[in-house]
Image (cartoon, rainbow, N blue to C red):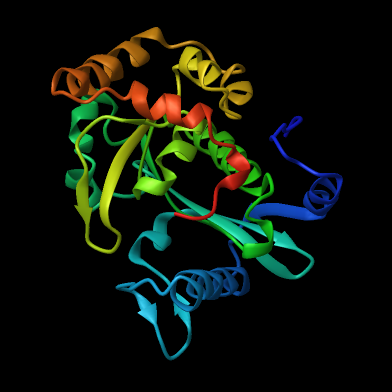
Amino acid sequence: MGRILVSGCSRIMKTKLRDIAIYQAESPEQRERLFRFRYQVYVEEMGRSQRYADQERKRIEEPFDATAANFIAVAGDEIVGCVRWNSGLDTDFAEYVDLYDMRRAGPYFPHHCGTTTKLMVAPTYRRTALVVLLCRTLYAYGRSRGVLADFMDCNSHLEGQFARFGYRPYRSRVIHPEYGNVLPMLLVCTDLDHLAAVGSPLAIIESHHPRRPDVTAYFHNHFFNAHRINGYDPSNTFAHARRRSLSAFITR
């Protein structure tokens, strides 16, 4: 996966990360452990209300999981992180189509669009580069499947961290049915200049893909430029992002 540089990394943290394996949760046993890990973080630790939480079995499995690529980070026999990605090749995106205004992607919707959700790490790994490893793994997988634009949303305290990966706001805040007031953000995979400018750990991966200035121009014209005209300047988020370390990333 290449060398990962994150400010504040200690020798102990690097040693800890060397013992982690990241792969898709595909077997019934792996998926069950994943769903239980989600419950531990979201319900037991954070106290979040979750529509699909099974309080009796202490697990969270959602309809999107049926068509998702769920990646887990495993240390020994313990899951310590996870992230979910859905592709327009496999899913209709359901409520996210309107929440993210995804139809604005025009000719690239839905087959070249994706959504990143359920990114979380265990408490003992929250100030390590584990989130970077998870996102790099997910990004490489998504690009192998032809994704050109990836959508996500987050609460205000995580906007800067996602901006460091290269995500940008493109519309006003919306109300998520589970997470309340959130900001939809978009990552244009082909915009290598932007990824490099914000120091994204995804830039090295994208540099190995063919340039697509037509794709980058389309999303600038239909998302970012239009958003700036409507009175929001995403550069404020970028400036904040440069001041934040990716190692401070906690959970969605």
In the foreground, 166 or 102:
166
Task: Please give left or right for residue 45 compared with residue 79 in the image.
Answer: left
Q: Which residue occupies 57% across, 57% down?
A: 82
In the foreground, 34 or 48:
48
Rendering coords of residue 126 (x, y %): 62, 55
In the foreground, 190 or 26:
190
On screen, residue 122 above or below 222: below
Q: Quadrant of residue 66?
A: bottom left
Rendering coords of residue 184 (x, y %): 29, 41
Rendering coords of residue 43 (x, y %): 44, 75
Instruction: Residue lying at the far left in this picture: please name it.
Output: 230
Task: Please give left or right for residue 7 compared with residue 32 in the image.
Answer: right
Q: Which residue occupies 31% across, 11% down?
A: 217
Does residue 208 appear in the picture of this structure?
A: yes
On screen, residue 26 above or below 175: below
Task: Please give left or right for residue 146 compared with residue 75 in the image.
Answer: left
How many marks overall?
Answer: 0
If the image is split into quadrants, where does the C terminus sit? bottom left
On screen, residue 205 above or below 120: above
Task: Please give left or right for residue 62 compared with residue 109 in the image.
Answer: right
Does residue 93 appear in the picture of this structure?
A: no
If the image is split into quadrants, where does the N terminus sit? top right
